[in-house]
Image: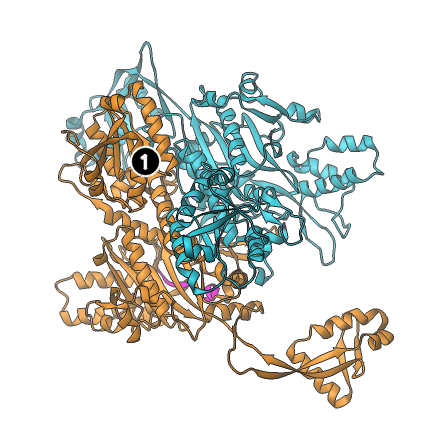
Chain colours: A orange, B cyan
Amino acid sequence: MEDLLKRRFFVRPSFEIYEGVSGLYDYGPPGCSVKRALETAWRRHFVHEEDMLEVECTNLTPEACLKASGHADRFTDFLVKEVGTGPEEGKSYRADKLIEDFFQAKLADPKVASEEKRKIREINPASMSAEQLHKLICEYAITAPGTAKPLSFPQPFNLMFETSIGPTRKLKAFLRPETAQGIFVNFRNLYEQNGCKLPFAAAQIGTGFRNEISPRDGLLRVREFTMAEIEHFVNPKEKTHSKFSAVKDMKLPLWSKTDQAKNSDPQWISLDSAVSSGLVSNQTIGYYLARTSLFLQTCGISPDCIRFRQHLDTEMAHYAKDCWDAEIFTSYGWVECVGIADRHCYDLKQHALASKKNLYAAERLSGEKKAEEVTVLKANKGKIGTVFKGLTQEILKIVEEMTEEQKAVAVKDLTETGKMQLKLSSQDVILTSEMVSPLKVAFPVTQTLFHPSVIEPSFGISRILYAVFEHVFNRRAEPGRNFLHFPVHLAPIHCSLLPLSNHPQFTPLITQLRRQLLDYELATETDSSSVSIGRRYARTDEVGIPFACTIDFQSLQDHTVTLRELSTMRQVRMPLSLVSQEIAELAKGRQSWQGLERLYPAFTRADT
Amino acid sequence: MEDLLKRRFFVRPSFEIYEGVSGLYDYGPPGCSVKRALETAWRRHFVHEEDMLEVECTNLTPEACLKASGHADRFTDFLVKEVGTGPEEGKSYRADKLIEDFFQAKLADPKVASEEKRKIREINPASMSAEQLHKLICEYAITAPGTAKPLSFPQPFNLMFETSIGPTRKLKAFLRPETAQGIFVNFRNLYEQNGCKLPFAAAQIGTGFRNEISPRDGLLRVREFTMAEIEHFVNPKEKTHSKFSAVKDMKLPLWSKTDQAKNSDPQWISLDSAVSSGLVSNQTIGYYLARTSLFLQTCGISPDCIRFRQHLDTEMAHYAKDCWDAEIFTSYGWVECVGIADRHCYDLKQHALASKKNLYAAERLSGEKKAEEVTVLKANKGKIGTVFKGLTQEILKIVEEMTEEQKAVAVKDLTETGKMQLKLSSQDVILTSEMVSPLKVAFPVTQTLFHPSVIEPSFGISRILYAVFEHVFNRRAEPGRNFLHFPVHLAPIHCSLLPLSNHPQFTPLITQLRRQLLDYELATETDSSSVSIGRRYARTDEVGIPFACTIDFQSLQDHTVTLRELSTMRQVRMPLSLVSQEIAELAKGRQSWQGLERLYPAFTRADT
């Protein structure tokens, strides 16, 4: 399949003519088209269906933002270097992956005792500290692959790409490692956009960048990738979801951390009982587990190749409350494609702290209103003006903008000594209690302020795309007749147009058909080459075009054409004028091929 | 208008809570939606309509690629720094812009003599060398704005953001300054994808990055932006376009370099005469001028606010043959939004040279076939094997892979001395003419190889978007009733749903309507707040929602609703079940509001 993806230019390594850069891939015409369709499907399934607020933020991110989020300090993998001399000297490896590979080899080795294998299975290098990794490397005498040279002590390596902004190159910046931060820093704008009401969800589809130490596994571990993230903001006290009841009876294969520890299989559990038993920590996570499963299925992933794995306590960030990965089964094993995490109030709190900005949501209090007594400083403009003349405006401004702490000090001074000191830009002044007087005011308490919690479903679009490619790949017994069977809405091109020959008499009908399909936003490809229809079918099958429309001599007479479906290779004969409409209905899932076969007569010939 | 864009979160400065980074902007929900719609419209107008090959390449670009393209060495602006001490010390300015600002002020000054103004108008700092800029700065005694301190000698400043890839940080890379290079390095893949036929066009919508020295002009000069580029590959001898005849009678306001020099206005000229007179250098450029004008018009830009300015000889890169900018009139004056350039064979030649890869296209020769005599080296495996044993494979491989130059040397040696020398990895060997013999072979010449020319229409999507915002902005006499009048297909949301009150009896109809609109891929917004319908109309008008559907008590009885159009504020009463279908037709331009008014009875009430 990887050969097909490369040969038909779905996706190829970037900068191949310059010998490439590992971990970077380009999407060619069919790949680009499927990727756009996948993004559109995601947008429809989540953004439009759930009324989310979609944003598009920048890739360039100043250091301040990523300091606050913790990425600048902690977004690291451990790196070990080969020690010694030789051509591989200083070659770097990602420590946890290197150890995992070493253990995989051990587990596959029949000579290793089962007791040792059991022990190895319990080790999880991905969640270890540098010391723990180093201990493992020493304990198992793990060396550099190929050269068997010793390895250095693991060093943290920040995975962000660094750059700088501006002519002085002084403003340090990074390429965003995730799209989420753009949403967090815009929380206030989005909250206002939503009429200052919770809950609401914001979403973003965009590029993420990670400077992987040693990219591998083809399209799965890359340095530049597309992700689609949702930040669902809720009141931390109410993580319910208004549409949970619509999915509560859905059963999903949930692999709890307890079952992982026991080495037992995921269990198919209804979301209702998963949430009520506390296995899934709240309705909102439960709702997204269901929506994620449905989304992956509409992309052509079969339900038995999807499972939801709960994060182990050792994997989870300290602030996270619960986290589930949607994993898809591929030729690389189970691959994490979506993460759904309850990040609690961590992100907004961190940004509020670092930026000193208000990132609160307000909750209107119901029931009995309490009153809160607040002390304000009332300035007497006339008195101040008489004494301080030209400084008056500055004094009034400073008094008005005092923080709560400064105000408390001033009130204390004024009450106890009858005066207070104020620092102006040019000098210090003394104000008396006649100029500013502390005043007690009773405010009714109508609301409380809090930092919303965030439930974050984060989709690796490039990974899901790869899984889709694998899942839609079909072999046929005849050589060279393999085909990709995309769901119609994801197909790179919806219909190929095949005139029986390249004789100009067919041109007007082809033009007409192409125009009609374009009007329905359906992509076409015309292949009027002189090879046989059978060989042209094979070409369109291979690239995953679900329908092929042949224009023959009969078409010239009665304006009917044959429409062929890719996977069944069956054909119907139908009026040319109805082709676009029917394919549009097929793409929207409102019509099926079987339905079409009931409407139009079958057409049979040898070379399908 | 900029207030509206910010307040309704169409677009806001990025990282505002961290005091922002100049030149970076985030698109909020309505802005993001309009931007996506603009990209979709572009894709429909160019990629689908013209059967282009769309690709998606990476933002990260290794230095080798940008060395070849010339960007690493020449993608620069000149920077001048403030000299001296003080808080502004070392502050950088873009030299040409600084001088232009200085001249603008002179031109606006009534005290400056008209002779001097005439002289100033002829100076074009944008195309000057460092020496020329410095001379101007000295001649006019231009100093740093604000402080009037002297300015340094202009220094070239590379506008690319630099980073590095991999754990050693040794592989230097940049963020792409344009999307075009991704297409050039994939030329071979795309050419094969197109069945090795010319002409064809490839397209890419993606992000570009430029580290502007001093970003300003709001959304027009930014550091991260979306662009959409087409690379149309043609045989350099045939820059005709098969669809040119369809646009040849179209008249466009072309501002030739001669007219610019004469200070006369652009002239409306038919494309046919522009191409035949040589003003526009070929049909392909002419065709794209037409398609670009049509595209901008479908985005809501009126034709009298579009002009095409030819590049002056001083502006154009040395390899370019002709270049035209589509400029749109905005509050910032005429703004360059699209560039259409004939880049000749420059790009492919440069990459072929740097990568040593074949980036040729082939042209099959018709008519009389010539034969070309080629000398090949024929190796005698048996003889070589007898003498060299284990080295045989290596020798055969080296002989086979010899370059033309190496072959010529070998043939000369073999002919003159009967032997030749060959460098193996381990040693040098001597081959006799019995082991390898030069053989003259006559090949029929069936094709010639050449580097295709490239016509490049390059669209600044973010700039066009800003121009659209300006052009769809409308004032109403009543305060707070301004509105954005997008073409329906670009509207951020297609229809707002307004129940007369938030009483639950309206919910089922709202749900039904929303579902129907979603099925037609139409975005909705429900506003069931308790404010008056009139105020809710004002809110949806301001954000540019073209249609508003009110569900009232009559709707509960007879399932009809009122549909209101934004710009006319007129309403019709129509069956709920037909709303989605009619709006879909309106969005596709197949129905008009006037048409709707003929079909359905008018509805009038006070609070529109």
Q: How crowded is mark 1: few (under 14 residues within 10 Å), some or many (20 or more)?
A: many
Which residues are the magenta region?
A70-81
List x then y, in percent, for residue A366: 51, 78
Which residue: 54% across, 22% down? Answer: B271
The residue indicated by pointer 1 is: A580
In the image, taking residue B514 as reference, residue B35 lies left or right, namely right
Find residue A259 and report its image quarter.
bottom left
List x then y, in percent, for residue A594: 20, 42
Q: How many numbered circles are shown? A: 1
In the image, taking residue B342 as reference, residue B448 lies left or right, namely left
Residue B212 versus residue B389 in the image, above or below: below
In the image, taking residue B508 as reference, residue B603 lies left or right, namely right
List x then y, in percent, for residue B470: 61, 44
Dot 1: chain letter: A
Residue A324 appears in the figure:
no
List x then y, in percent, for residue B353: 43, 32
Which residue: 16% across, 26% down? Answer: B383
Q: What element carries label 1?
A: helix
Residue lying at the far bottom of the rendered structure: A416
Which residue: 56% across, 55% down? Answer: B539
